[in-house]
Image: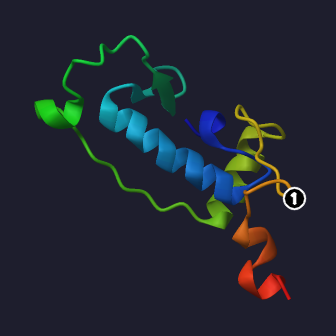
Amino acid sequence: MFETLINPKSFTQTVENLFDFSFFVKSGEGHITIDPETKLPQVKFDQSTPSGDAPPAASGDAKQWLMSFTPADFRELKELYGMEESNFEHRSEGPKSDYYDPLTHGNRESNRQ
């Protein structure tokens, strides 16, 4: 699961990916399964779900899961999986970008002086 959703260049973008994936799960388009060989969670996307079908939450089949995810967890998982590149494009910062990573640069307002 983490190999798919971690952006090794950004803790903040990783948290965003985890959050975004939760909506795919809610709509029935994303699933978390356990790999029978490694016993690790895997992310699965199912784009064949007809849009008219009731999502798991509406059908009563929904399950919820809460987890904490800290910068230390992020560093440990990056090292564990040996990750250097993301499965998703890294959103870069800069004058022409609306993306800003407060964990890297602190409060945006205080940096505008």
Mark 1: which amino acid? Gly
Count of marks placed on residues = 1
Q: Is residue 33 left or right of residue 94?
A: left
Q: Residue at x 71, y 31 (%)?
A: 87
Measured as percent of width and height from the top left, residue 110 is found at 77, 87
Measured as percent of width and height from the top left, residue 71 is found at 66, 65
- From the image, which quarter does the N terminus lie in? top right
Q: Is residue 35 visible?
A: no
Q: Residue at x 15, y 34 (%)?
A: 58
Q: How is the image coloured?
A: rainbow
Crowding at mark 1 (Cα within 10 Å: few <14, some 14-19, many 20+): few
39 versus 77 height, above or below:
above
Measured as percent of width and height from the top left, residue 48 is found at 39, 10
Q: Is residue 21 left or right of residue 73?
A: left
Q: Is residue 43 visible?
A: yes
- From the image, which quarter does the C terminus lie in? bottom right
Q: Residue at x 71, y 45 (%)?
A: 7
Residue sitting at the far left = 60
Reading the image, the residue beneath label 1 is: 94
Q: Is residue 70 left or right of residue 106?
A: left
Q: Residue at x 40, y 40 (%)?
A: 23
Q: Secondary structure at mark 1?
A: loop
85 versus 36 height, above or below:
below
Quarter-wise, where is residue 26 in the image?
top left
Measured as percent of width and height from the top left, residue 41 is found at 48, 34
96 versus 101 height, above or below:
above
Q: Is residue 21 left or right of residue 75?
A: left
